[in-house]
Image (spheres, helix red, strand yellow):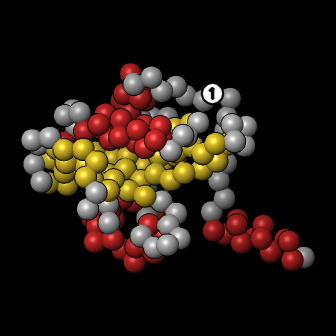
Amino acid sequence: MKILYADSELIIRQANQEDAELILDFIKSLAEYEKLSDEVSATPELIRKTMFTDKKYAECIIAFYNQIPAAFAVYYFNYSTFKAKPGLYLEDLFVQPEFRNRGIGKKMLSLLAKIAFDNDCARFEWSVLDWNVLAIEFYESLGAFPLSDWTTFRMSVNEIETLAKKLLD
């Protein structure tokens, strides 16, 4: 177990495969907060397969406040062609409501910034729902800024399959 930060109340460590159920609990809590519970199809098995095998797609850190699971963050490395360097993308950061306003989110973002710095990342990026004003204000207070010139596009499984089949037509 790799401890990334520790003080008398807070421990933040790298997640391991034994944390798959806990990670799923955090994902479900986040989805409920974002009013997207019906979109969660993750399972502990899928989490283990995609985060804790030789071909992992993401990594996770977990914060414990007085030994109680308080927060998690899932991130992965991407690549900037313009910079010819890696970037760190924060997929999810969630602090359980009862643990907010204790500096946990700030510590987690600081640790992620250190991971980005240590890996010579050119960028550290994430998305936030436009209605989440408290999160936006928090991120701006840390020096983050919104990218107003970009629009996020997404394809889900059905669209991916349809487009992929067009290659075969």
Q: Which amino acid does label 1 sit on?
A: Ser
Q: Which residue is drawn at 14% across and 40% down?
A: 7
- Secondary structure under tag 1 reads loop
Q: Which residue is drawn at 45% across and 35% down?
A: 131
In the rendered structure, the answer to whether residue 148 lies left or right of residue 28 reads right
In this rendering, is residue 41 above or below 5? below
From the top left corner, tell me how far across and down residue 63 is, in percent. Answer: 24, 49
In this rendered view, identify the residue nearer to me: 114 or 15: 114
From the top left corner, tell me how far across and down residue 92 is, in percent. Answer: 42, 49
The image shows a total of numbered marks equal to 1
Which corner quadrant of the image does residue 85 belong to?
top right
Q: Residue at x 28, y 67 (%)?
A: 19
In this rendering, is residue 117 above or below 160? above
Please identify the quadrant where the C terminus is shown. bottom right
Dot 1 corresponds to which residue?
148
In the rendered structure, the answer to whether residue 140 lies left or right of residue 96 reads right
In this rendered view, identify the residue nearer to me: 32 or 54: 54
From the top left corner, tell me how far across and down residue 130 is, in percent. Answer: 49, 35
In this rendering, is residue 168 above or below 154? below
Q: Residue at x 9, y 41 (%)?
A: 8
In the rendered structure, the answer to whether residue 153 lies left or right of residue 89 reads right
Residues packed near mark 1 inside 10 Å, few (<14), some (14 to 19) or many (20 plus): few
